[in-house]
Image (cartoon, grey):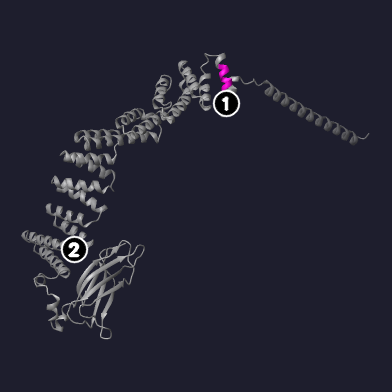
Amino acid sequence: MSNVDAQEKSGAQRATVSGFKKWRILILVLIGAAVVALVIFFGKPEKTAFEQAVELIKSGKSAFAVPILEKLSRERPDDANIYPYLAQGYLTTDRPAEGRLALDTALRLRIAGRQLAPVVSAYASYYTTKGHFAEAEKLFNSASSVMGAHDGADERARLYLAWAEENLRNTDLEAAVAHLKQANAHAEDVSEPLRSLIPHRLSDCYRQLAALAETKEKDQKKAASLLETALQVSDEPITRMNLALIYRQLGNTQGAIANYDLVSKADPNNLEARHHLVTLLCEKNDFQAAQTALIELTDKERSVENYVLLANLDLKLNNYPGAVRALEDALDLGDKPELLKQLEVVLLDWSQKLLKEGKREASASVKVRAERVAEQLSLLVGKPEDKEKPIEDENSLAQKPDEYFERVPPIALSSSRIWLARGSFTPEGEIRIRNISGRPVKDLSLKVLFYDHSSKRASGSVTLPVASPSSPPLETGGSRTLYFSSPSTVKSEHRLAVVIYWRGRLLKEYPVVKQ
């Protein structure tokens, strides 16, 4: 045998031995794993009857668990761990009376509260649902010696809330307050949202008691005391509003102001509180504070009344520029003759004041503004000398020459209806005119101007032909209805008016009514 053959033979033998060792190791590992598995499987201790019963209870199979637990309770009557599960099983299988005996036994044996709490809560919930509130309370009181403050706190709160609701249905406010006070005494141990609900309900009951004291007993001091207690329980705007009203009736103006002020700061959109605050500050002659409160109110509610009141407060504080601004803001909401007249008076007074102070240029400037306001006022209501002229009836007008009606309109507006339909942005209107000249009108047209007081500019105009030489005249004493619509759309927040002109002379201004 050559050296090469010997080497090949030796290599083959070594490979065979190595492969055999690997297979032997693999077989040994598999055998070891099988032995371990058998030991784990067959060596696991069998569950006790109690453990089996607990598993059945937790899996919702109480009907199978109860016989096991009953047998165990007879065999080991002093084993406290049995009774909570037995009580739970009885409750689930609709045997609450027997379950309560088991639960009382667990309490007597002083089992740990953590283990007992779920069962106590379950029974309390059962009693509460059935309306047996006193029994649920008795159970909680019995378990309080072994249960912690947090154990069953939510269910106890639900008990008193439900009990109070039953009291309210029976119009027993005093009892409802008593039960809600018990719930509120342990509110810190209750989870949300119950924790926030309890003081809210209790505060509401105090408000109801206060209302009864005020209306039936006519005892405003008692009502105020009850509302003050309600505030200690839960500081709510409605309580402060009611308390402020009673304070005002009792003559405690400062207390009412303080409450309205707190409500205004807590809820900037509570306009009612802001109005009352301004009124009380004015009654107290605290004009500076009233002005500040009213400025804040006008930021939320723009109205003619608010701006006029602000102007009056500014005048009391000798603030003429502020009064002028307030009246101009009021005029932005609609040109009213009385507002223009008031603005004219304020400007003239301001001009006189500046003149006395030696500020001639400023005084002259303010006086020019007053003259412009006077011109605007005369356009709306006419000049004073025109008002002094006697009103002429139709018979006297019939005696006038035709030239007279070159200066005076031969018609009168007898009715009107101006509207903006819901969802529409095109104002419409109709006016009814009547011939009062005592003769046929052969040539007449009216101009309708749509004027937006928000932007202080016209929003289009239309011409209404009434009669012309080429059309039938408007007969003596005759009437005609004229329909028109705006040539352009308007914004939803508009303050639009319709102004009727005859030959450039203002006849009437109507507001556009939103439908």
* Residue 356 percent coordinates (x, y): 5, 59
Q: What amino acid is labelled 1 in the image?
A: Ala
Q: Residue at x 80, y 30 (%)?
A: 18
The residue indicated by pointer 1 is: 63
CA gap, disc 1 and disc 2: 85 Å
Q: Secondary structure at mark 2?
A: loop
The residue indicated by pointer 2 is: 336
Tell which residue pokes out farthest to the left in this image: 356
Q: What amino acid is labelled 2 in the image?
A: Lys
Give the camera-side residue of 502 and 314.
502
Q: Which mark is residue 276?
A: none
Which mark is nearer the camera, 1 or 2? 1
Give the camera-side residue of 144 and 65.
65
Asked whether 340 falls inside the magenta stretch, the response is: no
Query: In this rendering, is residue 130 above or below 326?
Result: above
* Marks 1 and 2, the one that precedes in the sequence: 1
Q: Quadrant of the C terminus?
A: bottom left
Q: Secondary structure at mark 1?
A: helix
Asked whether 64 falls inside the magenta stretch, the response is: yes
* Residue 512 percent coordinates (x, y): 27, 65
Circle 2 crowding by C-alpha within 10 Å: few under 14, some 14–19, many from 20 = some
